[in-house]
């Protein structure tokens, strides 16, 4: 499966596509645009052979909208994202940082499958944006190709989302080593080795220890082919005791991983445990329900479109994460 929908909101604001000249925006007027602080502005260009660059479209946006009031920005497609990273985008945003004093939410790469598959999207060193916008409270990134995230300290970031079909161990280790004292929500799509996802449970150890993330209440480690290993590590992870939401969905979760979770530390304090897109047996679903729902834990056990293939010759069973290519 690929990513099929653009973001509907960011930073608590509804997404709005800024009408560039390339998309018929010549007909826009100040009266037809929403208030600058009322929406999450999405700026993008055609994915292939665009007649304008993303930076040129951003310049149009800066001329039409009061940047000082903008609270949320969504970076949509840039031309040939499968071939080049968002360097010009980072440069444009950082050059305008003094004109964006109220920017609090930023998402880079709101690109769907028909524009560019998630594992083909080239990224860059996204920590440059955190350094340039020290007041940012939410950062999201889609695409893991050439993604870099060296360890950083950022005192205001509350939500970090990294969506990939394969997240490199080096990036995971950089995030895990970062000092993010305000972070309450961490969402990592770890993906598969086929698309560069070579992290293992040991790379997540600093996150699971919880010492660098003292305010974390929502942890999502998902879309992974090592979902069982992750659940085994979570069973004794100190961070779990302070979570409100635990999300281990979208991956190759089997009865082994679910059993490890249930046999570990109590999960009855959670308000929500998300396991959707899984490979659980009926018996294990019933066990999870009977164990956790009486304690008030809301569960999502929907197998979704999880499907497996079996090799007719040797009986090998192939299972897949929700979002790969």
Image (tube, rainbow, N blue to C red):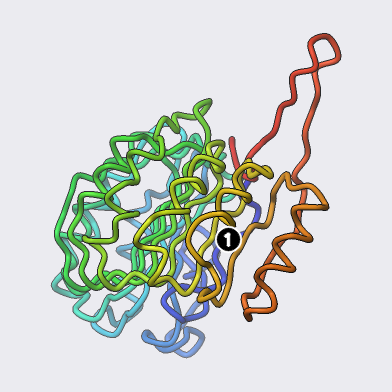
Task: Give the side of residue 317 with respect to residue 20, left or right.
Answer: right
Picture residue at 64% right of the left edge, 57% below the top: 275
Considering every residue shown, the one lying at the far right of the view is: 312
Task: Give the side of residue 177 with respect to residue 80, left or right.
Answer: left
Name the foreground residue: 86 vs 174.
Answer: 174
Name the foreground residue: 280 vs 292.
Answer: 292
The image quarter containing residue 138 is bottom left
Name the foreground residue: 3 vs 76.
Answer: 3
Query: Callout 1: 10 Å neighbours few (<14), some, many (20+)?
Result: some
Q: Is residue 149 visible?
A: yes
Measured as percent of width and height from the top left, residue 164 is found at 48, 44
Q: Is residue 160 above or below residue 165?
A: below
Q: Is residue 14 above or below residue 172?
A: below
Q: Is residue 114 visible?
A: no
Q: Quadrant of the N terminus?
A: top right
Picture residue at 33% right of the left edge, 79% below the top: 71
Circle 1 sits in a helix, a strand or a loop, which is it? loop
- Total tally of numbered discs in the picture: 1
| Residue pointed to by mark 1 | 6
Q: Quadrant of the C terminus?
A: top right
Picture residue at 61% right of the left edge, 45% below the top: 251
Measured as percent of width and height from the top left, residue 276 is found at 68, 57
Measured as percent of width and height from the top left, residue 293 is found at 69, 75
Name the foreground residue: 204 vs 45.
Answer: 204
Q: Is residue 282 above or below residue 279?
A: below
The image quarter containing residue 304 is bottom right
Considering every residue shown, the one lying at the far top of the view is: 313
């Amino acid at each position: 499966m690929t990513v099929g929908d653009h973001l509907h909101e960011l930073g608590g604001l509804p997404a709005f596509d800024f009408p560039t000249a390339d998309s018929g925006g010549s007909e826009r007027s100040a009266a037809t645009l929403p208030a600058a602080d009322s929406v999450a502005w999405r700026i993008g260009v055609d994915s292939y052979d665009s007649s304008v660059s993303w930076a040129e479209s951003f310049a149009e946006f800066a001329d039409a909208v009061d940047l000082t009031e903008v609270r949320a920005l969504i970076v949509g497609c840039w031309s040939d994202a499968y071939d080049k990273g968002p360097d010009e985008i980072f440069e444009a945003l950082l050059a305008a940082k003094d004109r964006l004093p109220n920017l609090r939410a930023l998402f880079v790469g709101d690109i769907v499958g028909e524009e560019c598959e998630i594992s083909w999207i080239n990224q860059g060193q996204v920590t440059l944006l955190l350094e340039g916008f020290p007041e940012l409270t939410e950062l999201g990134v889609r695409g893991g190709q050439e993604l870099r995230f060296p360890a950083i300290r950022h005192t205001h970031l509350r939500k970090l989302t990294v969506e990939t079909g394969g997240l490199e161990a080096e990036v995971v280790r950089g995030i895990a080593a970062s000092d993010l004292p305000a972070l309450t929500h961490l969402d990592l799509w770890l993906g598969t080795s086929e698309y560069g996802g070579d992290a293992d449970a040991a790379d997540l150890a600093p996150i699971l220890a919880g010492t660098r993330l003292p305010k974390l209440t929502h942890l999502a480690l998902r879309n992974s082919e090592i979902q069982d290993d992750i659940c085994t590590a979570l069973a004794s992870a100190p961070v779990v005791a302070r979570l409100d939401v635990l999300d281990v969905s979208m991956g190759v979760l089997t009865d082994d991983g679910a059993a490890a979770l249930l046999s570990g530390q109590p999960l009855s304090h959670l308000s929500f445990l998300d396991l959707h897109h899984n490979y659980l047996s009926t018996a294990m679903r019933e066990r999870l329900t009977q164990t956790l729902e009486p304690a008030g834990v809301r569960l999502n056990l929907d197998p979704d479109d999880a499907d497996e293939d079996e090799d007719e010759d040797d009986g090998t069973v192939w299972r897949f994460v929700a979002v790969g290519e």
